[in-house]
C-alpha cells in the first residue's frame, strides 16, 4: 500500500481507478479491507480512495496519545490532509461506515465545500448513552492487557447477522482476523474518541448534498429504524435497507451494497 506522510501522521491508502473521487472510511476496529468488494466494483467507474484511519491497518498513530483519544474531527482533518497530499481538489463522494460515519459527519460539517455527495452506512448521528460510553472506556482502559483477539471475540457476534455465522464463514473469519490484528493503541484511542463524540442530530437538516443512507436489515448496533430517522432529517436523502446483513453490510451483502452505491453514483448524484 502507498503511504502519505502528513503533518502529524503517516496514512496508508488504496487509490484505484479514475474519475470522480469516492472515499471509503472504514469502521472500528477494522481497516480498508472491509471495503474489498466495493473497491473492486467502484474502481471500474470512479477513483476509489480507501485509507486506513490513523492507527488502524497499516497507518501509524502519529502524534496521537491513546490515553487522550483521537477525536472524530481529527480523523476528518487527516482525510482533508490526505486529499491535499493526493492533489484532489474536486469535491468528493464520501462513504462512511459506522465509526467512519461518525468521522464523515465531522468532515461534512467542517469541509462542506470539498463534498459532492454523502453515503452513510450502518452509523449513528446521536452521541453515546452513559452506558455505551462506560463500555468504551472500560475497553480503552483494559485493551493492552486484553489484546485485540479478545475484542474480536466480544464484538464478532454484534457485528454480524446470525445468518452470516451459518452461511458465510469466510466473512466471519475475515472480520475476526482484521479485528484481532488491530493495534491496541488504535483501539484505545478510537474508543476514547468515540466516547467523546458530539451528538450530530441537530446538524442533519443542514446537510445540503445528495445523501444515501444504507443499513443492514439486521444491524444490531445502528438499527434500521434509527437510520430511517436520520434519512428523514436530511433534506436530500435516499434510504435503502439491505437484506441479509447485520452491521457489516458492505461485507455481508456486497452485491446489494454495490448496486445501491453504483445506482446512487450514476443517478442519485446526476440529478443534483
Ligand atoms: C464500528 O463498526 O465502527 C463500531 O461498531 C462503531 C461503534 O463502536 O460505535
Image: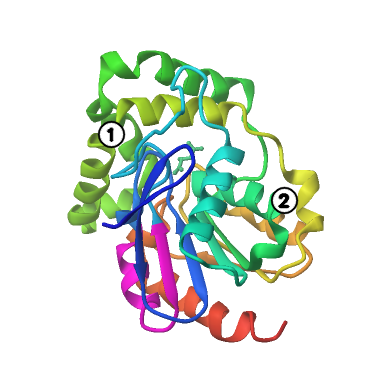
- Graded by Cα atoms within 10 Å as few (under 14), some (14 to 19) or many (20 or more), the crowding at tag 2 reads some
The image quarter containing residue 186 is top left
Element under disc 1? helix
Residue 139 lies left or right of residue 163; in this view the side is right
Q: CA distance from mark 2 to mark 1?
A: 32 Å
Residue 90, disc: none
Residue 101's spot in the image, x, y percent?
Answer: 56, 50
Q: Is residue 53 above or below residue 230?
A: above
Q: Which residue is mark 1?
A: 152
Q: Residue at 50% x, 49% y: name it.
A: 100
Residue 118's spot in the image, x, y percent?
Answer: 61, 64
Residue 219 lies left or right of residue 142; in this view the side is right
The image quarter containing residue 176 is top left
Q: Is mark 2 within 8 Å of ligand 1?
A: no
Contact between marks 2 and 1 (CB within 8 A): the answer is no
The image quarter containing residue 252 is bottom left
Q: Which residue is mark 2?
A: 109
Q: Which residue is nearer to you in this view: 78 or 167?
A: 78
Q: Residue at 30% x, 17% y: name it.
A: 144
Element under disc 2? helix
Q: Which residue is nearer to you in this view: 89 or 95?
A: 89
Q: Quarter holding the N terminus?
A: bottom left
Q: Residue at 52% x, 78% y: name it.
A: 20
Tag in front: 2 or 1:
2
* Residue 98 seen anywhere in this rendered image of the structure: no
Q: Earlier in the sequence, mark 2 or mark 1?
A: 2
Residue 133's spot in the image, x, y percent?
Answer: 56, 23
What range is drawn magenta here?
A: 35-50
* Residue 77 seen anywhere in this rendered image of the structure: yes
Q: Residue at 59% x, 52% y: name it.
A: 104
Residue 224's spot in the image, x, y percent?
Answer: 57, 54
Magenta span includes 20: no
Amino acid at each position: 500500500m502507498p503511504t502519505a506522510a502528513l503533518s502529524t501522521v503517516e496514512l496508508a491508502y488504496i487509490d484505484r481507478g479514475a474519475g470522480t473521487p469516492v472515499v471509503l472510511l472504514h469502521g472500528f476496529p477494522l481497516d480498508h479491507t472491509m471495503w474489498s468488494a466495493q473497491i473492486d466494483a467502484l474502481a471500474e467507474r470512479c477513483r476509489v480512495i480507501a485509507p486506513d484511519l490513523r492507527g488502524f491497518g497499516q497507518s501509524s498513530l502519529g502524534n496521537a496519545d491513546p490515553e487522550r483519544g483521537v477525536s472524530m474531527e481529527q480523523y476528518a482533518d487527516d482525510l482533508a490532509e490526505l486529499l491535499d497530499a493526493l492533489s484532489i481538489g474536486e469535491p468528493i463522494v464520501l462513504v462512511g461506515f459506522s465509526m467512519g460515519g461518525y468521522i464523515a459527519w465531522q468532515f461534512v460539517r467542517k469541509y462542506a465545500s470539498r463534498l459532492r455527495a454523502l453515503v452513510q452506512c450502518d452509523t449513528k448521528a446521536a452521541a453515546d448513552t452513559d452506558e455505551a460510553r462506560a463500555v468504551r472506556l472500560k475497553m480503552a482502559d483494559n485493551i493492552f492487557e486484553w489484546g485485540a483477539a479478545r475484542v474480536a471475540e466480544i464484538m464478532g457476534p454484534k457485528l454480524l447477522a446470525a445468518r452470516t455465522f451459518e452461511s458465510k464463514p469466510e466473512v466471519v473469519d475475515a472480520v475476526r482476523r482484521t479485528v484481532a490484528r488491530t493495534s491496541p493503541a488504535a483501539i484505545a484511542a478510537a474508543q476514547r474518541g468515540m466516547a467523546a463524540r458530539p451528538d450530530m442530530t441537530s446538524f442533519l437538516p443542514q446537510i445540503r448534498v445528495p445523501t444515501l443512507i444504507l443499513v443492514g436489515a439486521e444491524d444490531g448496533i445502528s438499527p434500521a429504524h434509527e437510520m430511517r430517522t436520520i434519512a428523514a432529517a436530511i433534506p436530500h436523502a435516499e434510504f435503502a435497507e439491505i437484506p441479509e446483513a447485520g452491521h457489516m453490510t458492505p461485507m455481508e451483502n456486497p452485491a446489494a451494497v454495490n448496486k445501491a452505491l453504483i445506482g446512487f453514483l450514476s443517478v442519485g448524484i446526476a440529478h443534483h
